[in-house]
Image: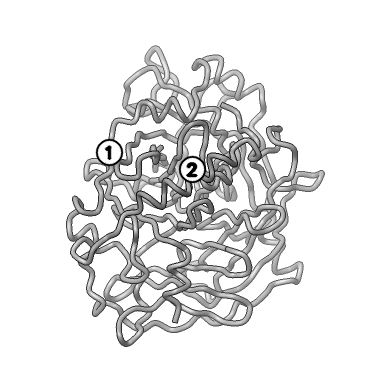
């Protein structure tokens, strides 16, 4: 289905708020089984340092590249009419377990403080060589939190491979209408080749993902300087052959056993030789226009600080060819509208809300990470225990997604998918 204007969904937004308030999951101490004594003190990253010089922001410039329309049309003609998100969810064949059914070792991935108010664990059979990373929701896609007839969570996973270029990227489409029973199925991310006569797998780690309007933007590292790939949520295609291969062959279309593929419709490429590709992205609806927020760790061995920055989304009428894409100039370039340096090391997920930046840092030592709120004036971390220790966050959350209609932040770490109110983060700040 095509994206529908926000003004047609306001009434359902009120229903969503009531639904979420009535079904919130209260996790008990027995469910989390996390000891505050595991937390340890960590150093402060300090205030953000604004970057305004052209030499500082030039490496963050993107050039937009679109897959030719004729290639997309050819692929759709060969594979059959694309299906919508609702059709994919109708075929959901797996169920996430709620926190009470998760093993103690799985629940160790939950934060100490603030506590998760919703938590689920993925099936062990879906893990193996796969690593969960990015999260986005229909709360990003539309401000009433509903896409078509469903509330949806998208969870990005990457297959670990020792051979460069042989990783796979897939997305779990999760039916979130009933938060007590999340059902999901898998869609493999692919890239059209040969003018739409075939496709290849997206060989990239999915550490960041944003679903905005009818487009899905994902972090990319499979093609040198490509920093983001773009997908059209109206172009999910069914496969026709249950084969171990990926692409056209054997009398049909296959995707290593997956029933659905989502072909890329474009990408954003770094223009500078020393460009910094984002490792995490999220959506900020508190800016005007809405913006894409990004973070990046410095290269291993580099003494450069980490970066936080943003791009504006296009403000073209919706639906339109530019809905869900970044704002660009007439030559197709997207420049950052704001950028900062942060002294935070090993940063993961990033979230911006109003003038505050929330940055998750990967856990060290005992395994727990930290969650910092940074501004241009100071930095404060969530704390826990009588000694107000700072290592209270989940071990490794590479992605943070704010569902505005419910006021919740969704993320995942290891085999746990969880959410908590953004307000609880503010209350936990030291």
Q: Looking at the rendering, in which quadrant would you find the N terminus? A: top right
Figure colour scheme: one colour
User: x%, y% of residue 177?
Assistant: 40, 39
Q: Which residue is mark 1?
A: 95
Q: Quadrant of residue 322?
A: top right
Q: Secondary structure at mark 1?
A: strand
Q: Nearer the viewer, mark 1 or mark 2?
A: 2
Q: Quadrant of residue 166?
A: top left
Residue projecting furthest to the bottom = 387
Decide: few, some or many residues near mark 2? Use Cα within 10 Å; few <14, some 14-19, many ≥20. few
Residue at 59% x, 66% y is: 308
Q: Which residue is mark 2?
A: 15
Residue at 28% x, 35% y is: 94
Residue at 52% x, 36% y is: 147
Q: CA distance from mark 1 to mark 2?
A: 24 Å
User: x%, y% of residue 21?
Assistant: 41, 52
User: x%, y% of residue 353?
Assistant: 58, 63
**Front-most of 99 and 407?**
407
Q: Secondary structure at mark 2?
A: helix
Image vertical order of residue 430 relative to residue 407, above or below: below
Give whichever of discs 1 and 2 has the lower sequence position: 2
Decide: few, some or many residues near mark 1? Use Cα within 10 Å; few <14, some 14-19, many ≥20. some
Image vertical order of residue 253 relative to residue 6, above or below: above
Do the residues bearing badges 1 and 2 touch, measured as CB atoms within 8 Å?
A: no
**Front-most of 183 and 196?**
183
Total label count?
Answer: 2
């Amino acid at each position: 289905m095509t994206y529908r204007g926000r003004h047609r969904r306001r009434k359902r937004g009120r229903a969503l708020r009531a639904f979420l308030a009535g079904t919130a999951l209260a996790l008990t101490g027995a469910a989390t089984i996390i000891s505050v004594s595991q937390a340890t003190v960590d150093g402060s990253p300090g205030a953000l340092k604004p970057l305004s010089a052209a030499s500082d922001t030039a490496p963050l410039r993107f050039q937009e590249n679109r897959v030719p329309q004729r290639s997309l049309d050819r692929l759709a003609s060969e594979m059959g009419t694309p299906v919508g998100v609702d059709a994919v969810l109708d075929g959901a064949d797996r169920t996430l377990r709620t926190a009470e059914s998760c093993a103690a070792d799985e629940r160790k991935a939950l934060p100490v403080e603030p506590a998760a108010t919703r938590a689920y664990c993925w099936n062990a059979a879906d893990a193996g060589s796969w690593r969960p990373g990015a999260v986005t929701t229909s709360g990003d896609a539309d401000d009433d939190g509903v896409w078509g007839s469903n509330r949806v969570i998208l969870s990005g996973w990457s297959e670990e491979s020792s051979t460069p270029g042989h990783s796979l990227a897939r997305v779990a489409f999760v039916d979130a209408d009933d938060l007590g029973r999340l059902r999901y199925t898998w869609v493999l991310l692919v890239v059209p080749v040969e003018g739409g006569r075939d496709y290849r797998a997206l060989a990239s780690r999915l550490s960041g993902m944003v679903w905005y309007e009818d487009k899905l933007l994902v972090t990319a590292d499979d093609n040198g300087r490509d920093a983001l790939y773009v997908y059209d949520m109206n172009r999910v295609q069914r496969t026709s052959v249950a084969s171990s291969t990926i692409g056209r062959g054997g009398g049909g279309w296959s995707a290593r056993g997956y029933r659905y593929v989502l072909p890329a419709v474009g990408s954003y490429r770094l223009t500078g030789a020393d460009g910094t590709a984002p490792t995490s992205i999220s959506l900020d609806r508190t800016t005007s226009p809405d913006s894409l927020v990004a973070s990046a760790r410095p290269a291993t061995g580099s003494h450069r600080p980490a970066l936080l920055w943003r791009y504006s989304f296009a403000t073209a009428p919706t639906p339109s060819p530019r809905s869900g894409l970044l704002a660009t100039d007439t030559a197709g370039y997207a420049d950052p509208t704001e950028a900062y340096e942060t002294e935070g090391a090993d940063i993961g997920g990033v979230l911006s809300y109003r003038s505050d930046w929330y940055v998750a840092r990967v856990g060290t030592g005992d395994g727990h990470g930290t969650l910092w709120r940074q501004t241009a004036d100071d930095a404060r971390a969530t704390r826990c225990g009588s000694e107000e220790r700072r290592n209270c966050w989940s071990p490794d959350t590479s992605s943070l997604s704010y569902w505005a209609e419910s006021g919740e932040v969704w993320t995942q770490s290891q085999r746990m998918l969880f959410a908590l109110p953004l307000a609880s983060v503010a209350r936990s700040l030291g």
